[in-house]
Image (spheres, rainbow, N blue to C red):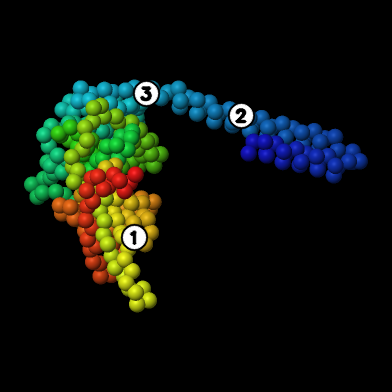
């Protein structure tokens, strides 16, 4: 944009010089055009320098530090805008100019599973308040799965409480994120970026395989028979659910999916929309297309471990 502006101004100056040739005032007009060009160039350079200086200042003022917990997890945070304290858990509090409370509290609950912990911290005398539920990967990689909920805060005005519960080595690591709605949109974005950066940086040392829904992964197969032009045609459908919560559903086409531990949700991996529901009972998996008008579950049988390995190879 900077070069384009200079080129445009140069063309205008040239046109002025050509159009005014032979007039007694041509020298004065040419000088004015040159002055305008120089002024425009100086303004563009000044603006560019200010932008670069501002970006450099932001880079310099960021003070990244790493917090390492005795519970075997670590997270990176920006010391210039986040303060870390320890008080019944580890607190990452946003210290920039903002309305209300904006923080992360991390605490480990030994011997308790995610849903149990989430109920205990969210419920009041009337049980669980209105909330939304989801699931997803946690931290810096894609090898740790988490249960998530979100609700309006019952103790802090105009605030939202988000919870991330991670099964960890026989217990649950709970991450509670409190954010207050900001009058200024840019401030809200800054808070979100700062707290999200902490969440995304989490690393879990010596993380053992998660047992929550450990019975689900595997390959499930179904033989179906259809009538085509009066002939019986047999086909093999299958559902492949992997330990990292990815998977494939093979029927008419192959669909890449993400499967949830709770409520049997199956999402299209590309769109994030729920497309199926599943139920696992022993070695049987029942899959239902939620878009069907009269949905009927298709019954799949789990392959033995050796058969699954051979078919994958």
Q: Residue furthest bottom?
A: 230
User: Which callout, 2 or 1, points at the residue further toward the start of the chain?
Assistant: 2
Image depth: mark 2 or mark 3 in front: 3
Q: CA distance from mark 2 to mark 3?
A: 30 Å
User: Which callout, 2 or 3, points at the residue further toward the start of the chain?
Assistant: 2
* Tag 1 residue: 251
Question: What is the number of the mark on residue 290?
Answer: none
Q: CA distance from mark 3 to mark 1?
A: 49 Å
Secondary structure beneath label 1: loop
Q: Position of 180 compared to 122: left or right?
A: right
Which residue is rendered at x = 34% and y = 74% of the image? 231
Which residue is rendered at x = 11% and y = 45% of the image? 124
Question: What is the number of the mark on residue 64?
Answer: 3
Q: CA distance from mark 2 to mark 1?
A: 61 Å
Of the pair 157 and 250, the residue shown nearer to us: 250
Of the pair 144 and 4, the residue shown nearer to us: 144
Image depth: mark 3 or mark 1 in front: 1
Residue 30 point in image, percent of width and height: 81, 36
Q: Is residue 115 above or below residue 174?
A: below
Q: Position of 186 compared to 67: left or right?
A: right
User: Which callout, 3 or 1, points at the residue further toward the start of the chain?
Assistant: 3
| Res 158 seen here | no
Question: What is the number of the mark on residue 46?
Answer: 2
Of the pair 22 and 74, the residue shown nearer to us: 74
Secondary structure beneath label 3: strand
Locate the C terminus by quadrant: top left
Secondary structure beneath label 2: helix
Crowd band around label 2 with a 10 angstrom C-alpha radius: few (<14), some (14–19), many (20+): few
Q: How many marks?
A: 3
Q: Verify CB contact (< 8 Å) between mark 2 and mark 1.
A: no
Of the pair 43 and 296, the residue shown nearer to us: 296
């Amino acid at each position: 944009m900077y070069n384009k502006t200079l080129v445009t101004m140069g063309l205008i100056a040239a046109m002025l010089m050509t159009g005014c040739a032979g007039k007694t005032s041509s020298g004065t007009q040419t000088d004015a055009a040159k002055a305008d060009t120089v002024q425009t160039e100086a303004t563009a350079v000044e603006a560019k320098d200010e932008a670069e200086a501002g970006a450099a200042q932001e880079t310099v003022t960021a003070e990244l530090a790493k917090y390492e917990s005795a519970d075997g997890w670590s997270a990176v945070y920006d010391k210039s805008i986040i303060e870390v304290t320890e008080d019944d858990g580890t607190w990452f509090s946003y210290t920039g100019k903002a309305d209300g409370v904006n923080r992360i509290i991390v605490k480990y609950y030994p011997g308790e599973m995610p849903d149990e912990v989430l109920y205990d911290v969210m419920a009041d005398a009337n049980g669980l308040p209105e909330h939304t539920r989801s699931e997803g990967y946690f931290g810096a990689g894609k090898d740790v799965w988490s249960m998530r909920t979100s609700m309006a805060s019952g103790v802090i005005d105009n605030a939202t409480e988000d919870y991330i519960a991670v099964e960890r080595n026989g217990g649950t690591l709970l991450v509670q994120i409190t954010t207050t709605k900001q009058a200024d949109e840019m401030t809200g974005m800054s808070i979100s970026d700062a707290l999200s950066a902490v969440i995304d940086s989490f690393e879990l040392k010596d993380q053992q395989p998660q047992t929550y829904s450990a019975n689900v992964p595997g390959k499930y197969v179904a033989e179906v028979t259809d009538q085509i032009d009066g002939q019986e045609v047999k086909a093999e459908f299958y559902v492949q659910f992997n330990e990292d919560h990815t998977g494939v559903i093979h029927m008419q086409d192959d669909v890449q999916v993400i499967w949830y531990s709770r409520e049997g949700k199956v999402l299209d991996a590309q769109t994030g929309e729920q497309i199926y529901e599943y139920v696992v009972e022993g070695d049987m998996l029942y899959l239902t297309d939620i878009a069907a008008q009269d949905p009927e579950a298709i019954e799949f049988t789990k392959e033995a471990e050796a058969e699954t390995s051979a078919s994958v190879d």
